Image (cartoon, rainbow, N blue to C red):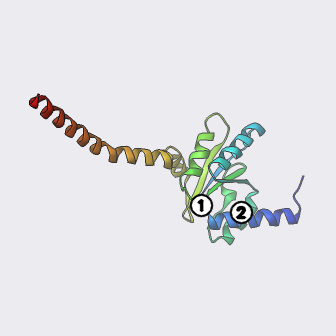
Amino acid sequence: MAKSKQQKALTLEKLTKLFKESTSAVFADYQGLTVPKADELRKKAYEQKLDYMVAKKTLINLAAKEAGIELNAKEMPGMLGIAFSADDEVAPAKLLGDMTKGTPIKLVGGIMGKKLVTKEHVIALSKLPTRTQLYGMFVSTINGPISAFARALDAIRKQKEAAVS
């Protein structure tokens, strides 16, 4: 069923707001996605505080133009779904990249910092660890020398106690 002008205006308004407020947006061709998988995608997006929308390419172009982004969605293949993030630049690519495993979703491009990026760039971003995983790796890297120093001091203490006894 076709959308009314009012519904299209609301979609355009929401898309424009998301393009303006987001640090990144990732486009995916969702053609062939089943309803349960689409629900799973929306649930995961909600859990990660991401916005996911499906819209016609004409509305996407209009919203991007209003947000000051040069974009021609009609050049992108398939039916487009867009994941937006205002906080984590990599999260939309990671979410949609993970969904490509076992579903017909295909990454087709993205926007990082108001600039268009290629499909290959988005695929590379989707393979990066999440922000939380990166924080964990960083903490363990910093903690490594400190714990080694603590073990060395403990070994010296034990050696001196053994010498005294």
**How many other residues sit within 10 Å of disc 2, few (<14), some (14-19) or many (≥20)?**
many
The single residue placed furthest to the front in the displayed view is 165
Quarter of the image where one finds residue 88? bottom right
- In space, the residues marked 1 and 2 are separated at their CA atoms by 13 Å
Q: Nearer the viewer, residue 138 or 101?
A: 138
- On the image, the x and y values in percent for residue 72 come to 66, 62
Left or right side of 91 for 74: right
**Dot 1 amino acid type:** Ala
Circle nearer the N terminus (1, 2): 2
- On the image, the x and y values in percent for residue 144 come to 31, 42
Which residue in the protein does label 1 denote? 86
- On the image, the x and y values in percent for residue 73 come to 68, 59
The single residue placed furthest to the left in the displayed view is 163
Left or right side of 73 for 94: left
Which label number is shown at residue 15?
A: 2
**Dot 2 amino acid type:** Leu
The residue that appears at 54% across and 56% down in the rendered structure is 89
- On the image, the x and y values in percent for residue 3 come to 87, 58
